[in-house]
Image (spheres, grey):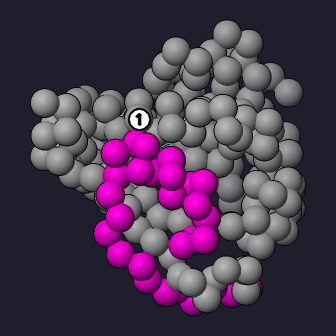
């Protein structure tokens, strides 16, 4: 389903990142219904439509005053408007853009196409050059090698492995979660 156009938050060569709208409900339900997409998030369980409507969409729509934008953007193919998934670039505190969390959830059809890396790099650049971000952090399960590789390609560096308690067991949880991060200073040094 293609949603009504909204002004883009960010554009790359192949991606348009825009605000979510309530019309994106079907897109989010479809994304969160794919067992492989949800493998490292819920163990492959789909998110019920009612949960998307009551909890997920309000979170995706929330605007953070410190950046003047939502912390989540719908990702579309720039030239076709095809929904690919979403990117997260969410301040960890409502009132400060100093530290943001980077994340992404893309449809399987978009995997291995470089979209996650392209969007992540563009968000990191925008954060450090225009949003007042000082540190970008990202987390995933230690066994999620593809996501870890995207973090590395976006310039983030491994920080630590840690263990959280989750309500339901997910295969690989015994290996923990990993945190990656990048500071503005590190990013600027890597560009010289």
Q: Residues within 10 Å of mark 1 (few under 14, many from 20)?
A: some
In the displayed structure, 7 sits above or below 39; it is above
Q: Which residue is depicted at the point 27% across and 48% down?
A: 97
Q: Is residue 77 left or right of residue 178?
A: right
How far from the left and from the top, in percent, is residue 147? Answer: 56, 55
Q: Residue at x 76, y 22 (%)?
A: 82
Q: Picture coordinates of residue 5 (x, y %)?
A: 67, 16
| Residue 100 visible within the image | no
**Residue located at (51% from left, 38% from top):** 117
Q: Which residue in the structure is indicated by mark 1?
A: 121
The answer to whether residue 57 is magenta is no
Quarter where residue 81 is shown: top right
Q: How many numbered marks, from 0 up?
A: 1
Q: Secondary structure at mark 1?
A: helix
| Above or below 66: residue 45 | below
Judge left or right: residue 30 versus residue 117.
right
Q: Nearer the viewer, residue 34 or 17?
A: 34
Q: Is residue 120 left or right of residue 85?
A: left
Residue 13 x, y percent position in the rendering: 52, 15
- Above or below residue 137? Residue 66 is above
Q: Is residue 124 visible?
A: yes
Occupied quadrant, residue 157: bottom left
| The C terminus lies in quadrant | top left
Residue for point 47% across, 25% down: 9
Magenta-colored stretch includes residue 158: yes
Pick the quarter of the image with the N terminus: top right
Instruction: Please give left or right for residue 169 compared with residue 147 in the image.
Output: right
Place of residue 167 in the rendered image (x, y in percent of width and height, measured from the top left):
69, 87
The furthest residue to the top: 79
Range shown magenta: 141-168
């Amino acid at each position: 389903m293609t949603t009504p156009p909204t002004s883009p938050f960010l554009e790359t060569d192949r991606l348009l990142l825009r605000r979510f709208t309530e019309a994106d409900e079907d897109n989010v339900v479809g994304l969160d219904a794919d067992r492989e997409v949800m493998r490292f998030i819920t163990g492959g369980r789909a998110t019920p439509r009612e949960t998307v409507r009551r909890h997920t969409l309000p979170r995706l729509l929330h605007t953070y005053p410190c950046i003047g934008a939502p912390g989540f953007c719908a990702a579309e193919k720039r030239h076709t408007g095809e929904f690919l998934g979403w990117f997260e670039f969410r301040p960890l505190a409502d009132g400060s853009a100093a530290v943001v969390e980077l994340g992404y959830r893309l449809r399987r059809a978009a995997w291995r196409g470089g979209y996650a890396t392209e969007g992540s790099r563009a968000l990191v650049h925008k954060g450090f050059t225009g949003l007042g971000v000082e540190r970008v952090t990202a987390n995933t399960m230690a066994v999620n090698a593809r996501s870890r590789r995207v973090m590395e390609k976006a310039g983030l560096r491994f920080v630590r492995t840690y263990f959280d308690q989750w309500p339901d067991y997910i295969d690989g949880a015994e290996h923990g979660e990993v945190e990656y991060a990048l500071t503005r200073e590190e990013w600027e040094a890597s560009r010289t």
